[in-house]
């Protein structure tokens, strides 16, 4: 993957939630089949939490959904309902960015890998996903 770091901006559909993330121009995105990701059609890339910044008054438009172990914190816009980012169980020290919510122009390559969320523990141990949030 490309290692050139750039500032990507993005957010939800109604633009009430906006953020900036420092990440390479080419990323590894994860397509997951867990009950939540599969229903949302979520494919996301992961960055260390310190490379993510909410912009403006975005926080006031966010709400959280959590289930199962309650480790993952699924953030979504109270106005339009889009989850443009969340705090994943696989990487509690990171942020998962829905790659389709990144504004056009800064992502040049997306490699999609499969994450078997229905068999979470096995997939977590085999994929190396935990390394994605390490600086």
Image: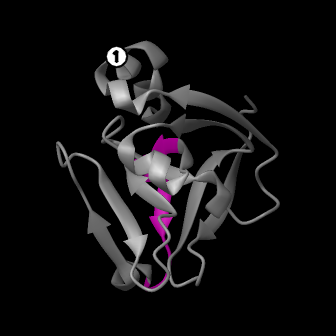
Q: Position of residue 127 (x, y in %)?
A: 47, 18
105 left or right, relative to 110: right
The kind of secondary structure element at disc 1 is helix
102 left or right, relative to 132: right
118 left or right, relative to 1: left
Q: Is residue 51 magenta?
A: yes
Residue 42 lies, with reference to residue 134, above or below; the image says below
Residue depicted at x 64% and y 66%: 9
| Residue projecting furthest to the left | 69
Q: From the viewer's side, name the closer residue of 107 and 71.
A: 71
Residue 1 lies, with reference to residue 73, above or below; the image says above
Q: Tell me where residue 2 sits by quadrant.
A: top right
The residue identified by callout 1 is 122
Question: How many marks can you see?
Answer: 1
Q: Position of residue 40 (x, y in %)?
A: 49, 56
Which scheme is used to colour this image of the protein? one colour
Q: Is residue 25 magenta?
A: no
Q: Residues within 10 Å of mark 1 (few under 14, many from 20)?
A: few
Residue depicted at x 29% and y 22%: 121
Which stretch appears magenta? Answer: 46-57
Q: Position of residue 44 (x, y in %)?
A: 55, 46
Residue depicted at x 27% and y 63%: 65
The N terminus lies in quadrant: top right
Q: Tell me where residue 92 sits by quadrant.
A: top left
Residue depicted at x 41% and y 70%: 76
89 left or right, relative to 58: left
Q: Position of residue 29 (x, y in %)?
A: 61, 38
């Amino acid at each position: 993957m490309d290692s050139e770091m750039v500032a990507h901006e993005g957010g939800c559909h109604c633009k009430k939630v906006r953020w900036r993330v420092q990440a390479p121009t080419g990323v590894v995105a994860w397509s997951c089949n867990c009950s939540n990701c599969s229903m949302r059609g979520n494919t996301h890339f992961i960055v260390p939490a310190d490379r993510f910044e909410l912009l403006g008054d975005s926080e006031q438009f966010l709400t959280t959904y959590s289930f199962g172990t309650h480790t993952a914190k699924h953030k979504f816009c109270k106005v339009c309902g889009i989850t443009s980012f969340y705090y994943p169980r696989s990487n509690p020290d990171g942020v998962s960015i829905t790659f389709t919510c990144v504004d056009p122009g800064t992502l040049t390559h997306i490699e999609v890998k499969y994450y078997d969320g229905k068999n979470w523990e096995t997939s977590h141990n085999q994929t190396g996903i935990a390394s994605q949030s390490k600086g």
